[in-house]
Image: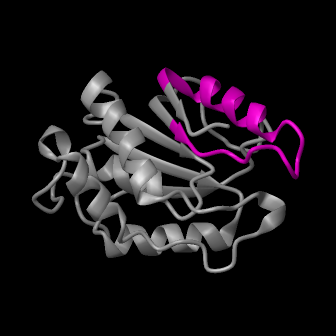
Amino acid sequence: RRRQRGRRRGRGGAAMKLKQLESALSAVQPFREPKIELEQYPTSAHLAARLLYAAEASFGDIEGRAVLDLGCGTGMLAMGAEMLGSAYTLGADIDPDALAIARENNDELEACADFIRGNVLCEEGLPLPPASFDTVLMNPPFGTRSKGADVGFLEAGLRFSRNAVYSLHK
């Protein structure tokens, strides 16, 4: 059962403090069995909160914005965008197991994000129009298993964003 937009729990947006965001994100469940070939590793609540908080507090790139989390994994960045009051959040990942956890996190945290399966590294693998999101967030693979994967994620972020791309990048 989906909650209607605007019925978030009494938190979020510009009023949320960094420590509150980090604490709330600590409830996001990690990968059960990370897949090495996909370079799956957890994004800590500490790191995610700082990225998201900077994007919102310094640049106003989350609240009221359409946000895409590329390679969303278990949904850490997507959940944070929801907590900070995004108008719409979409998480995209190639791994159905990660997406199942992301959906569980979404339900558990009473968020309203949507999730789709797609290949970020293939231009036709993610059926979204160019410049369809205000803000793109990502913690991409570093490219140790698939050379150039990190650059492919950045290129996809630039393709789908009409405003800003935030990457936790090596």
Kindly identify the residue that appears in the image at 70 percent across and 52 percent down.
118
Residue 129 location in percent, x, y? 60, 30
Residue 12 location in percent, x, y? 18, 50
- Would you say residue 65 is visible in this rendering? no
Queried whether the magenta region covers residue 139, the answer comes back as: yes
Color encoding of the figure:
one colour
Determine the image quadrant of residue 155: top right
Residue 43 location in percent, x, y? 53, 57
Relative to 168, does residue 5 appear above or below in the rendering? below
Q: Number of callouts in the render?
A: 0
Residue sitting nearer the eye, 8 or 142: 142
Queried whether the magenta region covers residue 45, the answer comes back as: no
Kindly identify the residue that appears in the image at 61 percent across and 31 percent down.
157
**In the image: residue 74, left or right of residue 41:** left
**In the image: residue 93, left or right of residue 135:** right
**In the image: residue 120, left or right of residue 54:** right
Residue 103 location in percent, x, y? 47, 69
Please provide the residue range marked out in magenta.
137-164
Q: Single out the residue that lies furthest toward the top.
A: 163
**In the image: residue 88, left or right of residue 157:** left
- For the C terminus, the quadrant is top right
Kindly identify the residue that appears in the image at 62 percent across and 23 percent down.
158
- For the N terminus, the quadrant is bottom left
